[in-house]
């Protein structure tokens, strides 16, 4: 079904997935806070990603690098001179806007445009600011956040909030080599925060100023880069379909050409997801060659070569970099899972989340909360199921139908109801419960042990 961003934002706020940042003070554009269900969903995505790309492999090494780094790192990587976006200013209000965004909104593709051609196109098309005012000539704006490391004498040192996590892997290349002696090919992976001074953050959690990135640098011999690129391309598609449950129609590949590639990349393939409003970037793969390691060798004076134990040859490895935006994954999962239908003569909204991703795996409920014997048995069942997974919820508020609807809306795959038959009112049904399935609303009578097996199977 077609879903709007407004529907996702409303559900996310109402059910405690995502809240506007600093909301009681009027908020801060481009910042969001994750609520209890949002944190659980995000952690589930992180854990699945880490399992696929790190835990099950023998050639991947996980790290967690510092957010604040020596500013020379960003000089060596080229970010101090190239991490720019074209900026225009409303000549009356002095508000600033991304020039490429204004072009896109006017139906003009800014891909490959220089600063000069952007300015010329704005004039030719007569584009105005959102307020209807004239725009300044475009200027390059560096997106890194500056801060400072203070000292007693006041001579502060300017440093940057990292705009990407990749450099943390490159500056730790020697540490991994020295500590673990890996053989090529091998990767260094991490999930971490990055910061970008977006002029016009927008589209909920799609474009923000504080983001999380799941990525790794896979170090290879230059001669095999095409083969490795294709292997990670296939593995990325498996991640989207097998782990996240996306359909093949929800993911597109976009080859990034020429000047649109990052300064470090020889080839970049972006993955686009079908968000409300069209396909937009969710991740990608870049062939960074030996750009980063060579620059760090030159700027730090540290030897960052790899010694081949078979040939005794020293060389600087090349790199394949698969990158995935975590916040954009959260948004994509919500969009992909959002459903509206009619059940029992009533309209309902539900999230068809795969059980592995769902924040809550099952809800246990006594049919009536004012019957101590039902409550006691329901708590016993819940304690048993929590041995399988900790995310087993409890709900005894309102009638059973309302409880089901609440769980549907947050994507809980199973609801388990304990009634008087569970207690033995009907002898043949003693120690059985009602298991309700989220997507269909169908119910079946099963033993508690069979319910446990259903949950295990869904989470496998």
Image (cartoon, rainbow, N blue to C red):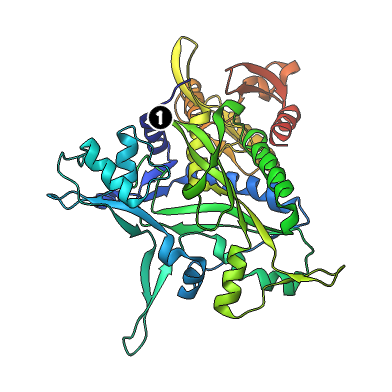
Inspect this view and state whether residue 70 appears. no
* Side of 269 where 275 appears, left or right: left
Residue beneath the point at 19% across and 47% down: 135
Quarter assignment of residue 166: bottom right
Q: Does residue 398 lie above or below 180 as drawn?
A: above
Q: Residue at (14%, 50%) from the top-left corner? A: 93
Frontmost residue, 360 versus 90: 90
Closest to the observer, 378 or 424 = 378
Q: Is residue 9 left or right of residue 219?
A: left
Report the quarter where the C terminus lies: top right
Q: Residue furthest right?
A: 310
Query: Is residue 336 placed above or below 330 in the rendered structure?
Result: above
x and y percent of residue 76 in the render?
51, 70
Residue situated furthest bottom in the rendering: 153
Q: How many marks?
A: 1
Residue toward you, 184 or 54: 184
Residue density around tag 1, few if under 14, some if 14–19, many if 20 or more, within 10 Å: few
In the rendered view, tell whether residue 440 sits above or below residue 135.
above
List the single residue furthest toward the top: 345
- In the picture, measured across the screen, residue 105 lies left or right of residue 419, that is left
The residue tagged 1 is: 277
Whole-percent x and y of residue 389?
Answer: 66, 42
Q: As drawn, which residue projects farthest toward the left?
A: 92
Residue 5, percent across and down?
39, 32
Compared across the picture, whether 218 is left or right of 273 comes to right
One can see residue 226 in this view: yes
Q: Give the image location of residue 30, x and y in percent.
A: 35, 49
Task: Please say if 111 is above or below 158.
Answer: above
Q: Secondary structure at mark 1?
A: loop
């Amino acid at each position: 079904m077609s879903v709007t961003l407004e529907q996702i934002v409303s559900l996310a706020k109402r059910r405690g997935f995502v809240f506007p940042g600093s909301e009681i003070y009027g908020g801060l554009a481009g910042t969001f806070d994750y609520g209890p269900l949002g944190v659980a969903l995000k952690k589930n995505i992180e854990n699945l990603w880490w399992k696929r790309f790190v835990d099950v492999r023998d050639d991947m090494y996980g790290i967690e690098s510092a957010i604040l780094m020596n500013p020379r790192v960003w000089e060596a990587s080229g970010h101090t001179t190239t991490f720019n976006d074209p900026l225009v200013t409303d000549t009356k209000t002095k508000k600033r806007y991304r020039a490429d965004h204004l072009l896109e909104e006017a139906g003009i593709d800014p891909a490959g445009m220089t600063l000069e051609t952007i300015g010329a196109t704005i004039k030719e098309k007569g584009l105005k600011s959102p307020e209807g005012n004239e725009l300044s000539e475009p200027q390059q704006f560096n997106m890194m956040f500056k801060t400072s490391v203070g000292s007693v004498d006041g001579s502060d040192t300017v440093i940057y909030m990292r705009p990407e996590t990749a450099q943390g892997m490159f500056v730790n290349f020697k540490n991994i080599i020295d500590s673990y002696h890996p053989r090529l090919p091998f990767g260094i992976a991490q999930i971490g925060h990055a910061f970008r001074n977006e002029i016009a953050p927008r589209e909920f959690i799609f474009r923000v100023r504080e983001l999380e990135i799941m990525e790794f640098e896979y170090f290879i011999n230059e001669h095999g880069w095409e083969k490795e690129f294709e292997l990670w391309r296939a593995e990325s598609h498996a991640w989207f379909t097998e782990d996240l449950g996306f359909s093949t129609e929800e993911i597109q590949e976009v080859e990034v050409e020429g000047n649109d590639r990052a300064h470090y990349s020889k080839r970049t393939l972006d993955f686009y997801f079908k968000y409300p409003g069209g396909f937009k970037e969710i991740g990608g793969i870049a062939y960074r060659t030996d750009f980063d390691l060579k620059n760090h060798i030159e700027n730090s004076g540290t030897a960052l070569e790899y010694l081949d134990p078979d040939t005794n040859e020293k060389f600087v490895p090349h790199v394949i970099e698969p990158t995935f935006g975590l916040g954009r994954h959260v948004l994509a999962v919500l969009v992909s899972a959002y459903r509206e239908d009619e059940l029992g003569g009533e309209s309902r909204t539900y999230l068809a989340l795969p059980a592995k991703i769902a924040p809550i795996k099952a809800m246990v409920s006594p049919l009536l909360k004012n019957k101590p014997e039902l409550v006691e048995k329901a708590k016993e069942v819940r304690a048993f199921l929590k041995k399988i997974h900790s995310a087993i919820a409890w709900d005894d508020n309102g009638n059973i139908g309302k409880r089901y609807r609440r769980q549907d809306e947050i994507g809980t795959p199973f609801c388990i109801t304990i009634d008087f038959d569970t207690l033995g009112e009907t002898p043949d049904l003693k120690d059985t419960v009602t298991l309700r399935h989220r997507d269909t609303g169908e119910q079946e009578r099963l033993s508690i042990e069979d319910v446990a097996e259903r949950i295990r199977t869904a989470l496998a």
